Amino acid sequence: MMRKLLSVGCLILLGLSSSFLVTSSAQGQLRNLFNLTTADFHGSDIRGTEFGRELVATDEGGEAFYFEDFKGKISLVFFGFTLCPDVCPTTLLQLSQLKTALTADEAEQLQVYLITVDPERDTPDRLTEYLSYFDPDFKALTGTQEQVAAMAKSFHVFYNKVPIAGEQYTMEHSAYVFVLDKEARSVLLFREGMPIEDMLSDLRKLQQFQ
């Protein structure tokens, strides 16, 4: 665990050198898009919405991935990119710790997905290496610029390419974790920085672990 924390710490420090901070504008747009309720959960109850239905992607192994492929496990879906300075590595580390807090049987029924918003730089090999710092079983999804835009739209995720120095750029993006049940139905939205105990409580409350 200490080695993992040190590795993730290095990723965060390297990312911060780009002097980029994810803005709150994208967060606010998604927050205001739905009348989200939290009566029964710590996260936002999004049951009845249909996120991701038009998803067409390529996984880190180069295989085609479709929305139906989410079925069979509880899916935690997060949009980000490998050069993200802060929110991506901290969120992925948190999801890794969440998985560790589950029982072995529960963890087997959970799958984490990172969908890149930077397909230009995030090659399958780069995505695989990046996710290995958090959990080698985490999966990555990518695609063409058009496919990524369509995926983001289907999840109502906002992202934007931001020029920095010279020809370099970074990305700003929404930083929510979408929870899909075993039938790939949208059920919960975890906000950035949500405590692991609250996520754990919500997942178990869904009664999806059998």
Image (cartoon, rainbow, N blue to C red):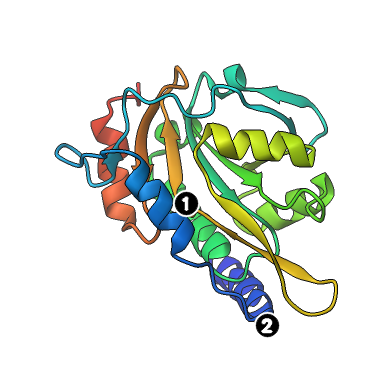
Residue 120 lies, in percent from the top left, at: 82, 52
Return the residue nearer the eye: 14 or 73. 14
Return the residue nearer the eye: 25 or 10. 25
Q: Is residue 139 visible?
A: yes
Find disc 2 in the rendering and name its residue. Answer: 17
Secondary structure beneath dot 1 equals helix
Q: Is residue 141 visible?
A: no
Quarter-wise, where is residue 204 in the image?
Answer: top left
For residue 153, above or below residue 18: above
Three-letter amino acid code of the residue under disc 2: Ser
Other-residue count near label 1 (Cα within 10 Å), few / some / many at <14 / 14–19 / ≥20: many
For residue 121, above or below residue 202: below
Secondary structure beneath dot 2 equals loop
Three-letter amino acid code of the residue under disc 1: Leu
Viewer-nearest of discs 2 and 1: 2
Residue 4 lies, in percent from the top left, at: 59, 66
- Residue at 23%, 47% in the rendered image: 42
Find disc 1 in the rendering and name its residue. Answer: 95
- Residue at 51%, 36% in the rendered image: 155
